[in-house]
Image (cartoon, rainbow, N blue to C red):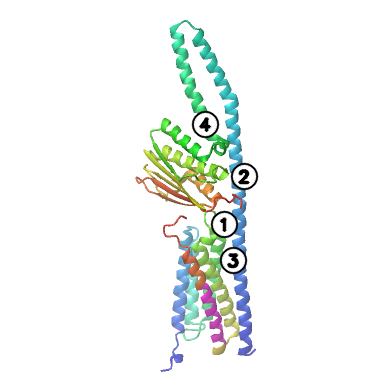
Amino acid sequence: MGSQEIVPLVVVISISVFIMAVLVIIIIYNVYRQRVKSQKVLLDAVYNAQENERTRIAEDLHDDIGARLSALKLRIDAIREDSKDPGSVTLAEESITVLDGVVGDLRNIIRNQASKYLINNGFIYELDRFQKQLSVRNKTELIISVSPNPTGLDSPFGVNVFRILQELVNNSIKHASCSVINITVNQVPGELTLNYNDDGIGFDITNETKKGMGLANIDARVRLYEGQYTLVTSPGKGTSYNIVFKNQSIKPTD
Amino acid sequence: MNFNSINNNLLGDIFYLIEGLLLISYFYLAFKEKDFFYPAIILAIAYIGYGLYTTLFDPGPMAYNSNFRTGESLVVQAMSAYALIRYSKMENINLVKDTGFWIAAGLFIYFSVNVAIFFTATFLIDESTYVMRKTWIIHSVVNILVNLIFTFGLTCIPSKQPR
């Protein structure tokens, strides 16, 4: 075979290999996309099941325990009214106060669990309620700022955002020993940004054991709606998250 | 002075040796896998050994060493293919916006074509300057494409943007 005859052969082989290499990369990318898609479907199903289970537990608590506590309160109230012994009256009044506290806590648990309240009452209302509830129960100051009239948050997407904030606040209160938490929810057309800062003890981001389920849960919830986040923390310097959802109208399985 | 008469094949061999070792180190560092440490060391030693043998004895320092180039291309092609498979299994990255993925993709395309070119050159081309020049044209075209891929990959590096 002469030198000039070899050239087309080399060209054909090279182009064929080039095309094959590009095809391999396209196949690998498609495998990745399919896997990500199936993971999203799975995550969505898991979170839906979780929300349904939360709603069921909340309804059970409301219908069963809530009703019994109300009945108990009525009976103690009747004892208080009928009793002529001042000691018994005082005891009944104290019991009613304790019972009112239990009913209030139960109501908060029910509202925190059931996503239907968030969708019915609205994201802002429930966030405000969450803030008030925390200020009563904890010494941590929660400062929330939301851009006016946000849209699309009274939906499963809003439930997802609310759960992320709940997880972040729980982490800060449980592990960070913080005194102030700042949350900013900012919406511009096509983009929702959550800025979260606490002044707690922070943690070593390179330490895998410190990350735990909470962070994995936040990561999964952010990825479910194709969001992106930055976590900045180090020991003694607080924790801050910047979470951006570019397209809130997408469905989690898109 | 006739520059065509300068024989720089030895320099080429040294370049391939350094390039190959740098790429083995790159893939080792990219994944930070402890399990990959000893295979990487063995691969690097084998690569140096093969490079020295082909440079010094067959075909020697004065001839174009397409054997070594083919060997290097095979090693990098295999590693970049492994890297691509690893990237496709990663959960917390956006593949299209990942610099590492684009670098691995560029290296895979570049060295796959290199394997074809230099393997063919090893067996079919016997001191034919004409064919070698045509071969280098193909190589240059692929080089341009790969540099475009690398450039796109480098634009994906997040400075302080959300990940």
Q: Chain of mark 1?
A: B
Task: Name the main secondary structure of what is drawn in magenta.
Answer: helix
**Within 10 Å of the Cα at label 2, are there few (<14), some (14-19), or many (20+) other Cα atoms?**
some
The residue sitting at the left extreme is A236
Give me the disc on residue A109. Answer: 4
Q: Nearer the viewer, residue A8 or A166?
A: A166
Q: Nearer the viewer, residue B123 or A48?
A: A48
**Within 10 Å of the Cα at label 4, are there few (<14), some (14-19), or many (20+) other Cα atoms?**
some
* Residue under label 1: B89
Q: Earlier in the sequence, mark 4 or mark 3?
A: 3
Between the C-alphas of marks 1 and 2, the distance is 21 Å
Q: Inspect the image, locate mark 2, and give the three-letter code of the amino acid beneath it.
A: Ala
Q: Is residue B41 visible?
A: no
The residue sitting at the top extreme is A84
Q: Nearer the viewer, residue A197 or B26?
A: A197
Instruction: Please identify, in this view, whether the residue under mark 2 or under mark 3 is nearer the observer.
Output: 2
Residue B133, magenta (yes or no): yes
**Within 10 Å of the Cα at label 3, are there few (<14), some (14-19), or many (20+) other Cα atoms?**
many
Check if mark 1 and mark 4 are on a common chain: no
